[in-house]
Image (tube, rainbow, N blue to C red):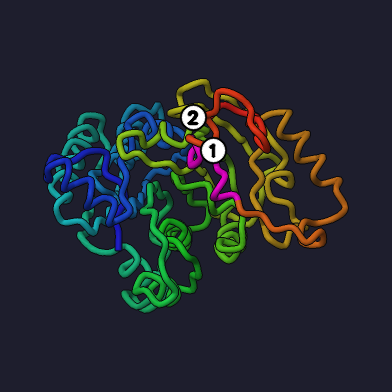
Amino acid sequence: MSSAFPLESAVCPPTTQSVKRQELGQFLTPLPVASFMASLFEQQPKEMRLLDAGAGAGALSSALVMRLCDAERKPNKIVVSAYEIDAAVIPSLESSYAECEAACMRVGIEFRAEVTNADFLETGRLFVRGDLFGTPQTPFNAAILNPPYRKIQGTSSARLLLRSAGIETSNLYTGFLALAAKLLEEGGELVAITPRSFCNGPYFRSFREQFLSTMSLRRVHLLESRSAAFREDAVLQENIIVHAVKSDVKPDRVIVSSSRGVPTDDLVECARAYSEIVSPSDREQFIHLVTDDAQDEARRTIRRLSTSLHELGVEVSTGRVVDFRARKAASRGHAVDLSVPLSRRIR
């Protein structure tokens, strides 16, 4: 099982901590990323009831609390419910919230943090099923997450816990997102940083159908470099930051933005029609992330093609030829037989 990705912790020696994070699916959240995510929240409730599922050392929820302390219109009260399975991180988490409490006190905001050293999947599904209070609960109006990333097998305890909450998915991060969405009240906001992999493919179809039926996308930010966001952990995943609101009413347009490294680097953004991001006629509910005119033209060209790859008898397997996995083969000084030039520089 896993917790989320702490910003920092001095509890374990670096080598031990690194191994433990990999086992739990944890990765560090850089401060610029946490600050950017906190900036995406739009609503200003008088009382914010914030979920940080897998809180780590509290980097994300602390960033949002500090931003609210500086806001022109401040909430009267902030209640943070933080779930963290790793007991070694709890002292750092409690220390972070002590700083949040002091900051809130200075500006007249009532603050309370409820830290639970437990598996979020176990506790969260009890709320959803109503086992704790007899009826299903939606106790939060905001959620900020950097969920654990790890595949889960069909017979694993995590898979069974999620299934008992009506969630079917093959990775911890989508399980955390789906459960957090269920715990949001109508109109509640969710901001999360995750791998991009859930946007398409058959493995995440069930998750997409469920998530997109209850959550309305407002903004998606692409971290174009595979390594910049989590450089210290040598993570080679394409990451995105998603801002969504719990509502079945979809906006006319979605903001799609991108940056080469952390979100403040070379930020580019545009507004796209919601139907271009998620087509209502697409049975797979793929999420199309187009950030510039060239990509938009490629999307339009592909849509004009009348024959599917399946009809042509062609299968796609990208894993073996992804550029960062083929550096030795791709980094040639000159062309050889059967070589093909790459269209972009390997990062």
Label 2 residue SS: loop
Locate residue 49, reporting x and y percent: 36, 51
User: Which residue lies at the image location 35% right of the left edge and 66% below the top edge?
Assistant: 121
Quadrant for residue 200, please give it: bottom right
Q: Which residue is mark 2?
A: 347
Q: Mark 1 and mark 2 in contact? Answer it, CB < 8 Å.
A: yes
**Rendered view: 326 above or below 282:** above
Q: Which residue is mark 1?
A: 323
Residue type at the position of mark 2: Arg
The label shown at residue 155 is none
Locate residue 163, reporting x and y percent: 45, 75
In this rendering, would 308 be left or right of 223?
Answer: right
In the image shown, does 37 or 137 lie closer to the viewer? 37
Upstream in the sequence, badge 1 or badge 2? 1
**Rendered view: 200 above or below 8:** below
User: What kind of secondary structure does the magenta stretch mostly adopt?
Assistant: helix
In the image shown, does 22 or 37 lie closer to the viewer? 22
Locate residue 55, reporting x and y percent: 28, 49
Magenta range: 318-327
